Amino acid sequence: MSYQFDIGSTRYRFNDLKTLMARATPLRSGDCLAGIAAENATERVAAQRCLADLPLSSFLNEALIPYEQDEVTRLIIDSHDPEAFTAVAHLTVGEFRDWLLSDHANSQTLKALAPGLTPEMVAAVSKIMRVQDLILVAQKIEVVTAFRDTLGLKGRFSTRLQPNHPTDDPAGVAASVLDGLLYANGDAVIGINPATDNYHAVTRLMHLLDDVIQRYEIPTQSCVLTHVTTHLEAINRGAPVDLVFQSIAGTQAANESFGINLSILDQAHRAALELGRGTVGQNVMYFETGQGSALSANAHHGVDQQTCEARAYAVARRFDPLLVNTVVGFIGPEYLYDGKQIIRAGLEDHFCGKLLGLPMGCDICYTNHAEADQDDMDMLLTQLGVAGINFIMGIPGSDDIMLNYQTTSFHDALYLRQVLNKPPAPEFESWLETMGVFDAGGVLAGGEKLPAPFAHIQSQL
Amino acid sequence: MSVDKKAIVTPNSWASLRRYTDARIGLGRSGVSQPTEPQLEFQQAHARARDAVHIPLDIDQLEQQLSEQGLESLRLHSQATDRAVYLQRPDKGRRLDAQSGALLKQIHERHGEKDATIVIADGLSSTAVQRHAAVVAAAIDRELDAEGLSRTPVCIVQQGRVAVGDEVGELLGSRMVILLVGERPGLSSPDSLGIYYTWNPRVGLTDAYRNCISNIRTAGISAEDATGRLMWLVRESRKRRLSGVALKDESGEADALEGTGRGNFLLD
């Protein structure tokens, strides 16, 4: 089916729904690279106005990627809940934006609506929303998950402590873990990216993190961000696995390029659930995503990168994850060129994921070949804090010495806590007070000396 | 009354743990924020990394370095005509330009098929390639020789990305491609080299068909260790006739990794 919109004497035509979606997307380098972006600003706004007039139900009738060709499309269509969709089934995309901004949309109605929405619907409405709309609507949504602590509660946010080290050296990793804990980070997960996929190195890290969590009785979970099949092997051989990690994307072909499919994820999800290691909840999956991954694998089917990203959330949603992290600026300038594009993409991803019912976090980050800097990250950090992000990254001094990019620091999280008055997860907050990292008022205590439970390390200094 | 300067910034007693890591730990704090000194150190490192991305590879020097290691080399170029195109068009960095393709076909016709090809691509850090590629290539070449494997000349690809190795290997008819590439520079590591290994290389393969050994540099994984891991992959993949996610790296024990030898002091 084709679409058209007139502006003045010019008629803009869009051959199919995916073309309309791509032309309506705010400018980003990845869509230009794919050759699917609007030719100019007027064509873009024509597509946005045309999209605004489209009934939401159109997305149930016209698949962007054919049902027969793609298991992610099949997952989206087969798991759609028409009952939940009823609340907004009569609306166009433009009217849906108005509804989301209105008082009709609140924490309860949005939670009930989530199973009735498809990734394409939320991607479509995000394309006609401004930054403040993306923040305002996301801020209404509460997505709570739990494993050894409770994440996503309103008025709080959490951090992933990311103690990466270029050779996975145990003392080097331990130094970053200690620094992070003493700066009150790590309630979402202590999650390390291993330097290699070597099975022995990976399981050694699993034991290292698990030993620390057990020794200090930290109400958090560990994760070594290796391939899902390595997790399965580790589980089978009895290594301590809290969360199973995998990078996922929004098309079957892109997932194949990661060496995964829904069936492998199913298998890993079941295996992790059987371990029963969670104490206050059983959300056992940690997923990472990012705009541009499908295009980077040449697996985008002519669908714009923001819509592909939203489709990845359908994959995540199936497995009740503890954490979904959009690694927004990692992929590089060929997909998100500069600070402006990275900031908007981060807010879109957070909005789309939350609307679909996911516990969204964001790796607020950039690489040294992108046109971005610390000021851009401060803007995205502050905006996502206001929007109610579930978790962000925390690393020493913003410098990831293994993955070679910059993300938010332990200090950045404390900045956000101070300006927005948002404490960490309740169980972790209590632990910080018990350990003497926080004083009784939830404020970072001292810093010159090690708190008593860590005093035995004094001899190392 | 003025505040005592010592009372403004809170230092961290654990800053001395930086002997175990290059990570920016123990920075101290002004309120909850980074103090001025580490803040400006960060800005300086970022400025240097930004500048480093754009320094072109000195190809004459690289050929000289390879020749000193006894390695013959060829100059190839991707379809990305310059750095600006390279950064915005990864598709062009993954394919050879017409002249390079024609040259490889000629070589293939003249010399027939070989077991292995080492490819060196500048990637995102010419510094990494300039500092480490010749030494790593020579170490790998010696090991391949010891295994009795035949090799083509080393192929240097300017403005090249990882996947360009597949086209090089396919055109030369090589059974395996070992690609050395400058990784995206970090603030503390502008000189990190990566190795990508592919069995039966051909245009169109995805990352699922490659094995990666990352972070080869002075303060990271050594050339010897990287070569050891690579040769494990080479031997396994020859047996199993595949590479990528189906070929897990189970080489040696984890202890083989270099490190401080200190272990996890949090458990003391």
Image (tube, rainbow, N blue to C red):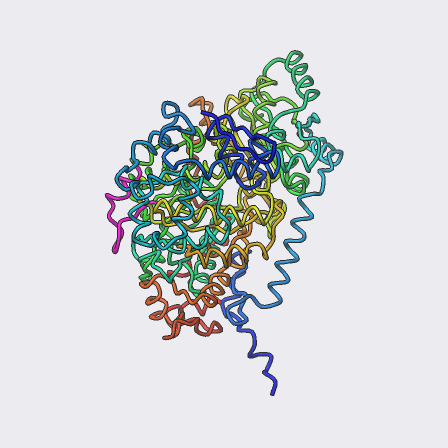
Would residue A270 be counted in the magenta stretch? yes
Residue most toward the bottom? Answer: B1
Of residues A437 and A19, the one nearer the viewer is A19
Seen as rendered, the residue at the extreme front is: A9
Q: Position of residue A451 (x, y in %)?
A: 41, 72
- Seen in the picture, residue A135 relative to A54 is either above or below; the reply is below
> Total of numbered circles in the picture?
0
Residue at 40% in and 59% down = A157
Res B120 → quadrant: top right
- Using residue A198 as the reference point, say whether residue B48 is left or right of it: right
Q: Is residue A265 left or right of residue B1?
A: left
Point out the residue furthest to the right here. B60
Residue A213 screen position, x and y as percent: 34, 58
Q: Quadrant of the N terminus of chain A?
A: top left
Magenta-tinted stretch: A268-285
Q: Is residue B139 visible?
A: no
Residue A54 position, x and y percent, is: 43, 35
Q: Residue at x 36, y 23 (%)?
A: A68
Between residue B259 and residue B163, name the one nearer to us: B163
Q: Quadrant of residue A194?
A: top left
**Foreground of the two, A238 or A25:** A25
